[in-house]
Amino acid sequence: MIERELAQHDAAEAGCQLGDENANLKMFEERDEKLSSSADELATIQAAKEEAEAELDRNFEEIEELLKQSFLRAVCQAHVLCGGPPASGDFDLDHEVYQDRLMLNAEASALATQEVESTEAGEGECLEGNQG
């Protein structure tokens, strides 16, 4: 009788352990499904991101071309309206017209800065002379 009770007790413990293991197994399966689902979502999001970046690149190229065409159209119109021949369209964005000459942007900026500094210095001298 004691043996029978011990066997029943052992069987009950084994059943509890089996139940715990089944619960753990179910928990791992659910976690695995969630991870798999998250991986699928991540892959979908990554693909959407790459597609959006490609579309942005295409849009940028199209906008850049439209801006270039609009700029050339305005320059050609300015030449016609000012009585000059139409522009050829050979423009260099690294150059700037400064004092009726075409020069590098950096040179034009340096000359403009020198002009401002000399003008400010001249104004300072005038103010000092008027105060004395």
Image (cartoon, rainbow, N blue to C red):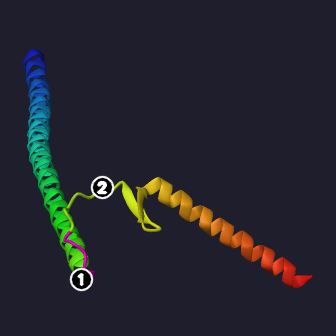
101 on left or right of 120: left
User: In this rendering, which labeled residue sits more in front, label 1 or label 2?
Assistant: 1
Q: Quadrant of residue 85?
A: bottom left
Amino acid type at circle 2 is Asp
Q: Is residue 61 above or below residue 36?
A: below
Question: Does residue 44 show up magenta in the picture?
Answer: no
Q: Position of residue 100 (x, y in %)?
A: 43, 68
Q: Residue at x 22, y 57 (%)?
A: 90
Name which quarter of the figure residue 86 lies in: bottom left
Q: CA distance from mark 1 to mark 2?
A: 22 Å
**As drawn, 46 above or below 131:** above
The residue under label 1 is 81
Residue 14 vs residue 63, the one in the foreground: 63
Q: Secondary structure at mark 1?
A: helix
In this view, the residue in front, 103 or 84, is: 84
x%, y% of residue 69? 16, 66
Task: Give the numbered dot on residue 107.
Answer: none
Give the vertical position of 47 relative to 64 (above or below): above
**Residue at the disc numbered 2:** 92
Q: Quadrant of the N terminus?
A: top left
What stretch of residues is rendered in magenta?
Answer: 81-86
Residue 79 picture location, percent across and down: 24, 75
The residue at 23%/69% (across/down) is 71
| Residue type indicated by callout 1 | Leu
Residue pictured at 10% horizontal, 31% vertical: 25
Q: Position of residue 117 (x, y in %)?
A: 66, 66
Of the image marks 1 and 2, the number of the one nearer the N terminus:
1
> Is the magenta region chiefly helix, strand or loop?
loop
Residue situated in front as seen by the camera: 128 or 81: 81
Q: Residues within 10 Å of mark 1 (few under 14, many from 20)?
A: few
Residue sitting at the far top: 3
Give neighbour class at mark 2: few <14, some 14-19, many 20+ (Cα, 10 Å). Answer: few
